[in-house]
Amino acid sequence: MTARLPLGCVKAVLIDLSGTIHVADNAIPGAVEAISKLRKSQLKIKFVTNTTKESVSSLHSRLHGIGFNIERHEIFSSLTAAVHHLKNNITECRPHLMVSEDAKKDFEGFSTANPNAVVIGLSKHHFNYEAMNTAFNLLLKGCPLIAIHKARYYKEHDGNLALGPGAFVHGLEYAANTVATVIGKPEKSFFLQAAESIGVAPENCVMIGDDARDDVIGAINAGIMGILVKTGKYRENDEDILPISRAWCVEDIGQAIDCIVDSLV
């Protein structure tokens, strides 16, 4: 699947973080240099992430520590999108937060007493019977279920794949006979908000990510071109599910950036 983007079409690049430019506290080889090369092109850039393991501030600090020159405002997080959803769609929202302690920093200002919504992200200590049962009973009382994302799995620092929150969200949906509102990738609204945040039409954006479904197909469903990289959670033949137009597969972020820069006129 040769990556030959339409000439002169790309005006902005959306870039996944974990698995695409870094894994845990290690930059993917060549990623720092690739981002620097992209900046010289003057294209608009947004780093889009589903991560719920840490707050945006902590994530920003960690990326700087790895060596990436990324500004905080350049990160568009599913946590940020979730906060926006709670403020605009649930009256006097009081969330029951199934997220990490650090991620809770992004929900400052919300009261959590007498919850009227269940918000679930990736938080390993919440994925046990007692915590899931607490959420289940809140759902039975009529609380809506808000899934920050429903990722199937992600790549740990040791190289192994680990369960994402998707299976646990599905379990709560099944048990409580409800349907979650999903905020992050691969939801169309997430990608459209990311494109809107940098003032570029979806058809002039390209998304780079390591997840064929959540990153690339999700972007395509929002009218955005997609490039799959063979790093992070990529598994052999993932590219086979991609549509033959508006999607390409390359080895890594370096090759993806080269293809994008080569398409400029």
Image: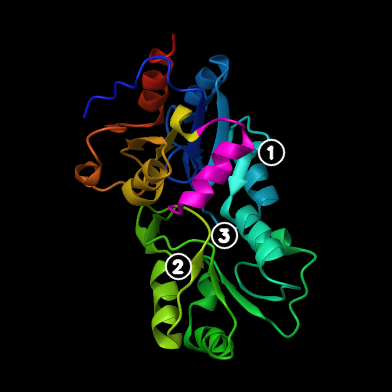
Q: Residues within 10 Å of mark 2 (few under 14, many from 20)?
A: many
Where is residue 188 shown, x and y percent of the image?
Answer: 46, 50
Coloring basis for residues: rainbow
Q: Which residue is mark 3?
A: 53
- Residue 73 has which mark? 1
Q: Is residue 76 magenta?
A: no
Mark 3 secondary-structure assignment: loop
Q: Earlier in the sequence, mark 2 or mark 3?
A: 3
**Callout 2 secondary element:** loop
Say which of marks 2 and 3 sits in front: 2
* Res. 25 in view: no
What amino acid is labelled 2 in the image? Pro
Percent across and percent down for residue 20 are 43, 40
**Main secondary structure found in the magenta portion:** helix
First to last magenta residue range: 186-201
* Of pointers 1 and 2, the one earlier in the residue sequence: 1
